[in-house]
Image: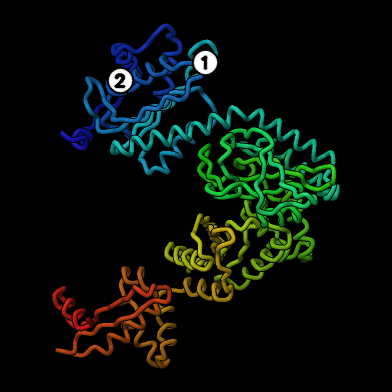
Amino acid sequence: MSAIDLRSKPSAPADLDAVSQAFSRLGGGGANPGAVRAFLAQAFEDYSADETPQIDSEDFACLLVEGWRAAEAQAPQAAPTITVGPLTGAEGRAVGYDLVRIVQADAPFLVDSVLGELAEAGVSVRALFHPVVEMGEDRRLSVILLVLDPVTQERRDSLGEGLAATLADVHQAVADHPAMLDLMRRSIAELEAGAPVAEAAVVAENVAFLRWLKSDHFVFLGARDYDYPRAVDGDYEAEAPLSQSGEGLGVLRDAERRVLRRGNEPAVLTRQMRRQMDLSEPVTVAKANLRSRVHRRAYMDYIGIKKYGPDGRASGETRFVGLFTAEAYDHVAAEVPLIRRKVANVLARADKAPGSHNEKRLRNILDNYPRDELFQITEDELLSIALGVLHLYDRPRIRIFTRPDPFDRFVSVLCFIPRERFDAAVRQRIGQILARAWGGRVSAWYPQLSEAPLVRVHYIIGVTPGDHPTPDMQQVEADVTEAGRGWVERFETALRRDGVQEVEVGPLSARWARAFGAAYRDRYDAAEAAIDLEALARVGEGEASLAVRAFRHADDSPLQFRFKLYRRGRRCRCRTSCRSWRTWG
C-alpha cells in the first residue's frame, strides 16, 4: 500500500501517559530519569493531534525513542548529527511522512535557521518537536524532530547538505560572538581616539550608533579586518586586492566569502569603494552580498568602520555582517543614532511650518520610510525623495523614486501606486519594467499597504557592477505609469496610438477590450492587442478567412521570426496551420 493510503486513516490522538508508557516499553530511558521526563514533557508540549493525525501514541513514542537514543549517542563537542529519511512508526510500519532529526549542542538561532532552510527548499513541515535536555557534565543538547511531507531521496540528500551548511554557520557565529563584541569594542575605542577627517559631532554620532548596535539591536554573524592597498606615492590603488589583516570571525572565517562583491570576484578596493571611502563618514551601513542562513533568510547588513593611519587617512576597515534585530526596526527614526541626525537635518532643510499639515505629514513619511534605506541613503537623497513623496500625497498617481547603491550592486526603487489600482499583476508588471530598464533582476520587493491613498512597493533591482545600462528615467516613468493603468484604459490608448478615430475608440473598446482573455493579457500588452485587432479586421469570409502576420520584436535576434495566425469562425486545425506556414517557405 502507498503512503497516501496509510495517511488516509487517522489514528487516535496521543496522550502523555500513553506515550510515556510506550516510550519505556520500546526501550527508551536510561540512567537519568529526570532528563527523560523533561525530554518527553517538552516534546509533548509541541504535539498537536491535527498536525499528524496518522501518528498514534505508539508511533509518537517510537519517534521519541529514536530521538533520545541519538541524543545519548551524541559525543561532546561533536558536529550536529543530521538524519533525513522516511518516518517509521511502531513495528516498523510506514506512516507516510519523512523525518528530519537533528541532535547538537544547544545554541541560539537553531530552530529558526533550520526552518529557514526547509522553507527555502520548498518542504512542507507538518510537525516540529524541540526538547532541550541536560545530559550531565554541563552538556545541554538540542533535539529537533521535524515531520515532513515525503520527498524524493535526491531531495533528502540535498536537505541534509543544506542543513549541515546552515548549522555550521550558526555554530561559527555563536562560537565567535564574544570575539566579535571585543572587536567592536576595539573599533569604538579607536574611533573615539580620533577620526582626523570627521567633525567631532559626526564621530560622536557614529560612536553612539555602534554602541546602539551592541545593545541587542544587531545580530553579529561575522567580522573581518581589511587593509587598503596603497601605492608607492601613498595614494590608494583602485581595483587592487584588499589584504586581510587577521583571521575572520563567524561566517567570515571562510576567506572566500565576499561582503561587497560577488562570490566569484576577489575582494578589491573598487573605484566605487574608493569614492565612498573619500565621501562617507567613519561608519558605513550597506547591504552585503551575502544572504544569511542564520536566524532569518535575508541579505545581511554590512557595517564598515574605518581605521586611520598615522597620515590621518583611512588605512583599512573592520567589516561586520549580521542582521538588525526586530527591536531595531521598532524604534522610531528619531531614537536611532545615525539616522536621527539625517531625519532632523531633512526636517530642518525642508523648512515646513512647525505643527502644519505638511510638517506632520513629512514627519510621518520619514518615520515610515524603509528602515534599511534610512541607514544607507544620503541626507540629500532623503530630502529630495521625502519632498517628492509629500507632494505626491496631495496628488495621488503612480510615481517612482530611485536610489543607486554607492557600490553599484543594485538600484533601490520606491514605487507609489494609488490603492484602487494596485494588485499583484500591476506589481509584477512594474517590477519587470524596472528590471529591464537597468538590465538586471528583481532581487526583492516589499509592499506596504495601509489606509493611505497610496500603496508603496520597495523594489531592489540587482545589477552587474559597472556593466548595466543607465535608463532614460522619463521613459521608465512613462512605462511604469502605463503599467499601472487598467487593461481597458491601456487598450483604448493603444487604439488611439494606432490612429483610430476618437469616435470609434469607445465602440471598439466596448466590443473588444474584454474579449482578450486573462491568458492573452498575461502574455501580451495592449499595444499588441490593438495590432491583433487590426489584423483580424482584415480577415475576410470563406477562402479569405485565414491570415498570417510575421513580425519581430525589437529585442529579437536575427535568427528569431514570429508568426501569428488569424481566422474567422471555427478554430483552425493544426493541418491547416501547417499549410499556411508552407506558403511562407
Q: Can residue 359 be seen? A: yes
Tag 2's secondary structure? helix
> Horizontal and vertical percent for residue 483?
47, 72
For the point 77% across and 37% down, the residue is 188
For the point 56% across and 49% down, the residue is 265
**Image-based side of 573 in relation to 126, left or right:** left
**Image-based side of 519 in relation to 328, left or right:** left
User: Label for residue 331?
Assistant: none
Q: Can residue 150 be seen? A: no
Image: 267 above or below 540:
above
Please tell me which of labels 1 and 2 falls first in the chain. 2
Image: 134 above or below 372:
above
**Disc 2: which residue:** 62
> Horizontal and vertical percent for residue 134?
50, 15
Residue 356 appears in which quarter of the rendering?
bottom right
> Horizontal and vertical percent for residue 83?
36, 27
**Disc 1: which residue:** 139
28 and 247: which is toward the camera: 247
Amino acid under disc 2: Cys
Tag 1's secondary structure? loop
- Which quadrant would the N terminus be assigned to in this image? top left
